[in-house]
Amino acid sequence: MKIPIFAKKGVKFYDEEFDEYMSKIGGEKLAQDKPLWEVHLIKYPTRKNNAAGTSVVKLHHSLGDGYTLMGSLLSCVKRVDDPSIPITFPSSHATTSSIKRLPESIFSMFKSASDFGWNILRGSNFIVDDQSPIRPENKEFKHGFGISNVTLSLDSFKVVKNKLKVTTNDTLVGMIFLGIRLYMEAKSYESRKTQATAIVMLNARKIRAYKSVEEMLQTNSDTSWGNRFHSLHLPIPKLSDANTCNPLDFVLEAHKIIIGLRNSSVLPLSGLILRMLDKIKGTEVCCSSTFLVQQKK
């Protein structure tokens, strides 16, 4: 366990020092001769976190993906009504008639081919983003990076998602896309309409519910422990006078992009190509692919 000592004394809150420390440990590599995790105990109050202190756990991605790590966390908690029963979450299953599925299947075929081809062209650099504040001519990061944090109200997210009939994830992605475009516009007004792309990590598992650690340690292609994720290129919506005045348009645009991705088979198609590349060229070539990343157990 690491307990940092901040130089500044006598202040009420340490948000600036906290952000600087997070940026510092975020840019440091984990020691290869020690376990691939660290625990940092920050004994200073912060205003944004509304906390008297903060504990930070830094993990290497080789230990598992978000699904397995969240499953481990949920395995540590118990139900209040009956601790012997594993924790469960409500789920909904929508049914669709065969007649309605036919046009959706036809659309999915064309959408899958389009998404798959576009991602290959992006990864092969046949299609490149325009020069912009987030893609300068010199692609190297001269000033490193910084980590900051912000607290958002879950109730506010619920108001937006219920009003637009979208998901919380749609709302978050739309907010991030809008923030990126506003930053680009502040740096260069012309960049508000340049072609820009985000690489988004997606869960490649077919299951919808979390499993216990015991279940994940069993041999199963869907629930077993490890890394099963893909990364895909998603176009960042362009900024216009209309959606600047109504930021909710960005949420709707993000929803449309994500819905299109769900109706596409680009993930399994890309996974098939990646597995073929792994067998023919080896793991190193496979992992260096720029249009798709999938780490295995």
Image (spheres, rainbow, N blue to C red):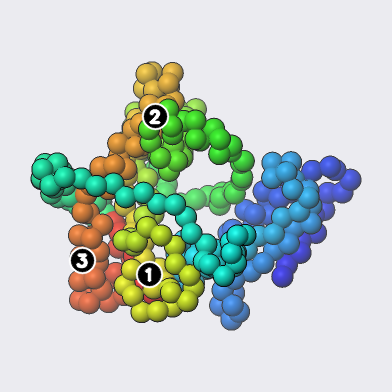
Q: Is residue 75 above or below residue 106?
A: below
* Residue at left offset 25%, top offset 42%: 260
Q: Is residue 29 above or below residue 163?
A: below
Task: Indicate the amino acid at tag 3.
Answer: Leu
Query: Which mark identifies residue 223?
Result: 1
Disc 2: CA contacts within 10 A as few (<14), some (14-19) or many (>=20): some
Look at discs 1 and 3 and give the one toward the viewer.
1
Q: Secondary structure at mark 3?
A: helix
Q: Is residue 198 above or below residue 253?
A: below
Q: Secondary structure at mark 2?
A: helix
Disc 1: CA contacts within 10 A as few (<14), some (14-19) or many (>=20): many
Q: Position of residue 123 (x, y in %)?
A: 27, 54
* Viewer-nearest residue: 133 or 201: 201
Q: Is residue 71 above or below residue 219?
A: above
Q: Secondary structure at mark 1?
A: loop
- Whether pointer 1 and pointer 3 mark residues with C-beta atoms closer than 8 Å, the reply is no
185 horizontally vs 289: left or right: right
Query: Which mark identifies residue 281?
Result: none
Query: Which mark identifies residue 272?
Result: 3
For the residues labelled 3 and 2, the Cα–Cα distance comes to: 35 Å
